Image (spheres, helix red, strand yellow):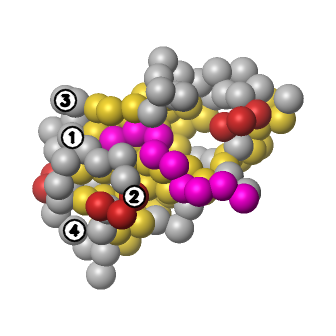
């Protein structure tokens, strides 16, 4: 049974930082592209970042470039999202997801999802 479990969310002031983690089990972690998505209340789920199998390549949404950094540790079956310079508009539930294809931005291409972790940024 595949499980993705996010952690690290919380309430932070604007300008602050958080590091989200997503621990995976039940799959060959190094065979999956990992992505982070987010969903704010009343909005569709949107792509944030994705990372290649080896971790050498990453892709970001324009809205987070320069502030978010995705990384992975295949030995620990964990993917991370370092979030810096947080803005109130970053408030959302953040999800990690896994797919065996490319670094897709469309959530429909992802096979497995975590339950999400809430990030709330106060102004």
How far apart are labels 1 and 3 at the CA level? 6 Å
* First to last magenta residue range: 42-50
Q: CA distance from mark 2 to mark 4?
A: 19 Å
Which circle marks residue 27 in the picture?
4
**Circle 1 Cα neighbour tier, 10 Å, few/some/many (<14 / 14–19 / ≥20):** many
Is residue 30 magenta-colored? no
Q: Is the residue marked by circle 2 packed among few (<14), some (14-19), or many (20+) residues within 10 Å?
A: some
Task: Give the image quarter of residue 118.
Answer: bottom right
Give yes or no for contact between labels 1 and 3 (Cβ–Cβ under 8 Å).
Answer: yes
Picture coordinates of residue 103, whole percent (x, y): 25, 44
What's the CA distance linking mark 3 and mark 4? 20 Å
Label for residue 56? 3
The residue at 72%/21% (across/down) is: 15
Q: CA distance from mark 2 to mark 3?
A: 21 Å
Q: State the image quarter where residue 109 is shown.
A: bottom left
In this rendering, position of residue 21 left or right of residue 76: right
- Element under label 4? loop
Q: Which mark lies nearer to you, 3 or 4?
A: 3
Residue beneath the point at 29% across and 48% down: 104
Q: Is residue 85 left or right of residue 6?
A: right
Q: Residue furthest right?
A: 123
Image quadrant occupied by the N terminus: bottom left
Residue at which label 1 appears: 52
Q: Write the residue at 15% across / 39% down.
A: 54
The answer to whether the residue labelled 1 contacts the one labelled 2, judged by CB atoms less than 8 Å apart, is no
Percent across and percent down for residue 34 are 31, 50
Q: Which residue is mark 2?
A: 107
Between label 1 and label 4, give the one nearer the viewer: 1
Q: Earlier in the sequence, mark 1 or mark 2?
A: 1
């Amino acid at each position: 049974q595949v499980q993705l479990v996010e952690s690290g969310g919380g309430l932070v002031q604007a300008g602050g930082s958080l590091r989200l983690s997503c621990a995976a089990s039940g799959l060959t972690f190094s065979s999956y592209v990992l992505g982070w998505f987010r969903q704010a209340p009343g909005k569709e789920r949107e792509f944030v970042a994705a990372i290649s199998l080896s971790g050498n390549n990453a892709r970001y949404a324009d809205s987070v470039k320069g502030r978010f950094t995705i990384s992975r540790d295949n030995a620990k079956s964990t993917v991370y999202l370092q979030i810096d310079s947080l803005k109130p508009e970053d408030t959302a539930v953040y999800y990690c997801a896994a797919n065996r294809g490319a670094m897709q931005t469309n959530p429909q291409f992802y096979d497995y999802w975590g339950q999400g972790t809430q990030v709330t940024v106060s102004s």
